[in-house]
Amino acid sequence: MSVLVFTENWDGKFKKMSFELVSYASKIAEMLNTQTVVLSIGDVQEDELKKLGNYAADKIVSVNNDKLKNLDNQVYTSVIAEVATKEEATVVIIAQNNMGKALAPRLSVKLKAGLGAGVSKLPASVEPFTIFKKVYSGKAYSNVVIKSDVKILTLAQNSFEFEENVKSPAIENFEATIGDVKTTVSNVQKQTGKILLNDAEIVVSGGRGMKSGEQWAPIEELAELLGAATACSRPVSDEGWRPHEEHTGQTGKIIAPNLYIAAGISGAIQHLAGISSSKCIVAINTDKDAPIFEAADYGIIGDAAKILPDFIEAVKEIK
């Protein structure tokens, strides 16, 4: 028996989310009195793989094949299922991101496994196996019992407080059965010079209260000072003030930074669904009754165009 965790890498490097997944998996392995096995797909050097051992990985299975350079959902699902079967995994853990949302349902069918999507805490119980998750766009919470022999969990980003627990895992290079790859990539364009929204620890976001795209300079300046990513609400991206890749919310990107600063955002339920997992929310709005204040940890009632310059000066003084 084992707990299998699938980790993603970016150009052969692991990011915080991968370490969070391994740490979370190791805690479940402790609850089940079994080992933590980490699956890495792609060209990752041994020194980088060993970093996973800092978060209590007992074993690392590395699958490297030229056919796996680009994500093909069907092929990746087959590889994960093959390793899960080989390692006799009773729990499989994946990130609750775009890749995880694509892979987890396929894997659930292939392994005949119950799926717990978007969990944010350790299971309340392993007998019966009971998971805790948010429902209704974070408005409520639910305990769900998974009765299948194999369970698949997708972990919400930045939801689990993890710490180092150093082990010396064995590293196994595994030759997986690779089927026909049907996905082809003809062109790749990577964003450079900016912090990616999904990876950002701090996000500065603007809404329609910023009045126009020409008023975005304070948002960008504050983000640069804080080492943050910039984001926006859906009306802003619909108006063309900001690019659609910055749109956060139920129909945009779901994020969970440590700090989310919302300037001129009213806080419609669709927007809150995308940012409610943020550790700390600071809201700036002229309307004291704006829904964003119900979710905010700190609220400033006022015009963002007037408050942001003072905010920026305060940050400069502190720095």
Image: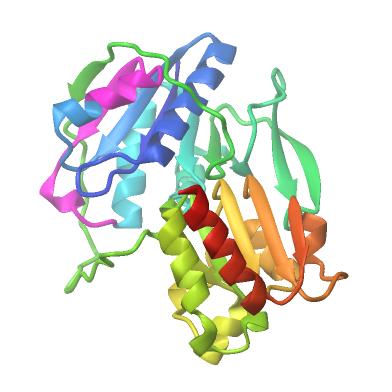
Examine the rendering and report whether any part of residue 251 can be seen. no
- Is 240 in the magenta? no
Q: From which residue to which does the magenta span run?
A: 50-71
On the rendered image, what quadrant is the N terminus found in?
A: top left
In-front residue for pair 124/126: 124
Q: Quadrant of residue 145?
A: top right
Tell me the residue at 29%/51% (across/down). Answer: 75
Total label count?
A: 0
**Lateral position of residue 48 relative to residue 198, left or right:** left
- Of 187 and 106, nearer the camera is 187
Asked if 286 appears above or below 34 in the picture, the reply is below
The reply to whether the magenta stretch includes residue 54 is: yes
Quarter of image, res 153: top right
Residue 89 at what x, y percent from top left?
44, 24
68 over 238 or under it: above or below: above
Place of residue 280 in the rendered image (x, y in percent of width and height, measured from the top left): 65, 48
User: Residue reaching furthest top?
Assistant: 33
Q: Which residue does the image show at 65% across and 32% down from the upper left?
A: 121
Asked where in the image residue 116 lies, by quadrant, the reply is top right
Is 273 situated left or right of 313 in this image?
A: right
Nearer-the-camera pick, 209 or 252: 209
Please identify the residue farthest to the front as the structure is shown. 317
Q: Is residue 68 left or right of residue 99?
A: left
Is residue 135 in view? yes
Give the residue displayed 59% in from the left and 62% down from the top: 311
- Residue shown at the point (63%, 58%) measured from the top left: 275
Above or below residue 231? Residue 228 is above
